[in-house]
Image: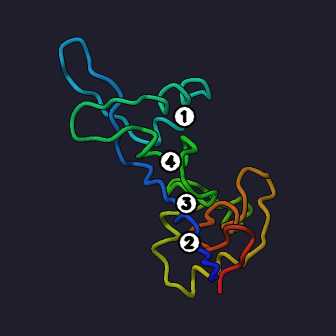
Amino acid sequence: QILTVTVEPPPSPCIEISKEKFFWKTKKNGKVVNKNCIWLAKKNVDEIENICAMMEAEGPKGLAKDVCQATCETCPSECFQATSNKFFYKMKKGNPFYKNCLWLSKRTDDKIAEICLKENLDPSDKYPPAMIGCPVTCESCGGVEPQ
């Protein structure tokens, strides 16, 4: 008797493209209104839950739960980030200086690794270091550090 074990790969990490649009509503005049993930992320928790629970869309844009997976917490993986997530980059002229994950993702691999390995903490405690704020770009999901 042969025992067969099927190992499924872990789900892919999600990157939410913050300016990506989703179907929000249709006005009484029939005009379709689309919104982006940045708009959604600024809503209160109850509004986010209601918008993310929508099951029907009109027009070519998808539903919030599919487009804004980080904000809606619908990513199949526990590793996700939004391109607009900010992280503490460095102090500049005595002030904290922040960058976002989209900016980080456009650096060279060596520069990404250098920034992700920095453990500098924001003196104002406003944003985390890159490794925590941008775990997909930093490949730090599950506490694994970038190579």
Residue identified by numbered label 4: 69
Depth check, mark 4 against mark 2: the one in front is 2
Toward which corner of the image does residue 129 lie, by quadrant? bottom right
Determine the residue positioned at 60% across, 24% down.
46
Q: Amino acid at mark 1?
A: Lys
**CA neighbours of label 1 inside 10 A, class few (<14), some (14 to 19), many (20+):** few
Asked whether residue 147 is in view, the answer is yes
Depth check, mark 3 against mark 2: the one in front is 2
Residue identified by numbered label 1: 42
- Inter-mark Cα distance, 3 to 1: 16 Å
Determine the residue positioned at 58% across, 44% down.
73
For the N terminus, the image quarter is bottom right
Residue identified by numbered label 3: 100
- Inter-mark Cα distance, 4 to 2: 20 Å
Toward which corner of the image does residue 115 lie, by quadrant? bottom right
Q: Nearer the viewer, residue 113 or 11?
A: 11
Residue identified by numbered label 2: 9
Where residue 92 sits in the image (x, y, percent)?
67, 66
**CA neighbours of label 3 inside 10 A, class few (<14), some (14 to 19), many (20+):** some
Residue most toward the front?
1
Q: Are marks 4 and 2 in contact (CB under 8 Å)?
A: no
